[in-house]
Image (cartoon, helix red, strand yellow):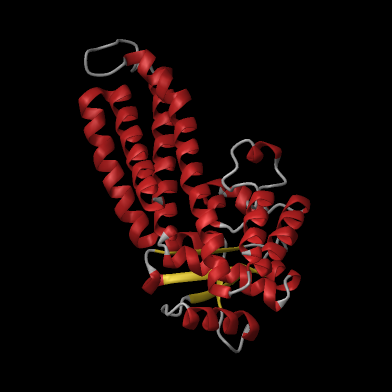
């Protein structure tokens, strides 16, 4: 059911991009938007992992650099019968982690230095099992495509703003919406794109929690980690993530939790509900 829902949401993002193009440039604008969507999807498929890792200056590590982190990932990959992902460390005091990559054979997991200091081995296992579940479910690709399309729609909204400034949307026509279409695109399209992107992310987090708990064999390990992560990110939000808000949904908890404006468009379900579901799994 999650796969069907995600497919529909990604289709809605593509359709929204095309409608925004039509509102600005009529049928020609819609065709350009469709081509743009295809190019963005292909680019995010091949290069999203490199881009995200570069944004956060993640450094690759091996068993000699981070023996505990590497061994936990290795054990979980073996248990899940997965290819061993590349392992990275991000130099940042805010505890968090994310996974990226187009498929399980080309995946990477990254943990911040703050996470490695805060978690014990059991909690670290719970966090990394969650991230490896994202890889197994191919959530990393879906999230990258959704973020890319949402960003493209925001770019079209900026184009609509410039079109109004220079009078390009002054005359309504049969194909496009003219000034009214440009205004609607400028205001409504980014909001709709953000809501769709959030829905993709939230639906996937619950699945990764459940799959991660099964992979580790201990739902309460992840529950304990989520409690610590929520408190820590409230106290010390990640400044680097604030510079790249489109990547916030990649992390196990929202790295912008401490920013009030970010909370209006939270990319993650409530941590309390996630913990409640994990505790229910443990009781069962």
In the visual, does 24 lie left or right of 200? left
Q: Given the current orientation, which residue lies at the most extreme bottom position? A: 64
Quadrant assignment, res 34: top left
Residue 7 to residue 221: above or below:
above
Q: Position of residue 93 (x, y in %)?
A: 72, 63
Q: In this view of the protein, can residue 54 be seen by the observer?
A: no
Quadrant containing the C terminus in the rendered view: bottom right
Q: Position of residue 102 (x, y in %)?
A: 37, 63
Q: Position of residue 275 (x, y in %)?
A: 67, 56
Residue 125 to residue 263: above or below:
below
The mark total stands at 0
Q: Position of residue 140 (x, y in %)?
A: 44, 59
Q: Given the current orientation, which residue lies at the most extreme top position? A: 171
Q: Nearer the viewer, residue 89 or 284?
A: 284
In the visual, does 207 lie left or right of 141? right
Q: Residue at x 58, y 67 (%)?
A: 213
Residue 84 to residue 29: above or below:
below
Q: Residue at x 34, y 42 (%)?
A: 8
Q: Residue at x 56, y 49 (%)?
A: 244
Q: Nearer the viewer, residue 202 or 115?
A: 202
Residue 79 to residue 238: above or below:
below
Q: In this view of the protein, can residue 143 be seen by the observer?
A: yes
């Amino acid at each position: 059911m999650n796969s069907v829902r995600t497919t529909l949401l990604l289709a809605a993002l593509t359709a929204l991009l095309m409608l925004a193009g039509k509102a600005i440039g009529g049928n020609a604008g819609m065709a350009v938007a469709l081509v743009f969507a295809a190019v963005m999807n292909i680019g995010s498929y091949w290069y999203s992992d490199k881009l995200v890792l570069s944004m956060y200056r993640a450094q690759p590590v091996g068993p000699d650099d981070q023996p505990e982190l590497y061994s936990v990932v290795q054990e979980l990959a073996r248990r899940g019968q997965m290819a061993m992902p590349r392992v990275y460390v991000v130099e940042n005091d805010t505890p968090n982690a994310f996974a990226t990559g187009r498929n399980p054979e080309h995946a990477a997991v990254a943990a911040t230095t703050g996470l490695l200091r805060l978690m014990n081995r059991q909690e670290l296992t719970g966090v990394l099992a969650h991230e490896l579940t994202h890889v197994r479910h191919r959530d990393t690709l879906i999230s990258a495509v959704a973020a890319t399309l949402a960003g493209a729609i925001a770019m079209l909204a900026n184009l609509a703003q410039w079109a109004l400034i220079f009078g390009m949307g002054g005359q309504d026509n049969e194909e496009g919406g003219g000034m009214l279409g440009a205004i609607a695109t400028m205001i409504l399209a980014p909001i709709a794109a953000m809501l769709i992107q959030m829905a993709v992310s939230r639906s996937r987090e619950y699945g990764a929690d459940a799959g991660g708990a099964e992979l580790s064999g201990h739902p309460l390990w992840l529950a304990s980690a989520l409690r610590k992560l929520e408190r820590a990110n409230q106290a010390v939000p990640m400044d680097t993530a604030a510079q790249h808000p489109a990547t916030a949904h990649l992390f196990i908890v929202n790295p912008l939790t401490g920013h009030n404006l970010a909370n209006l468009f939270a990319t993650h379900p409530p941590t309390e509900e996630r913990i409640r579901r994990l505790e229910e799994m443990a009781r069962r």
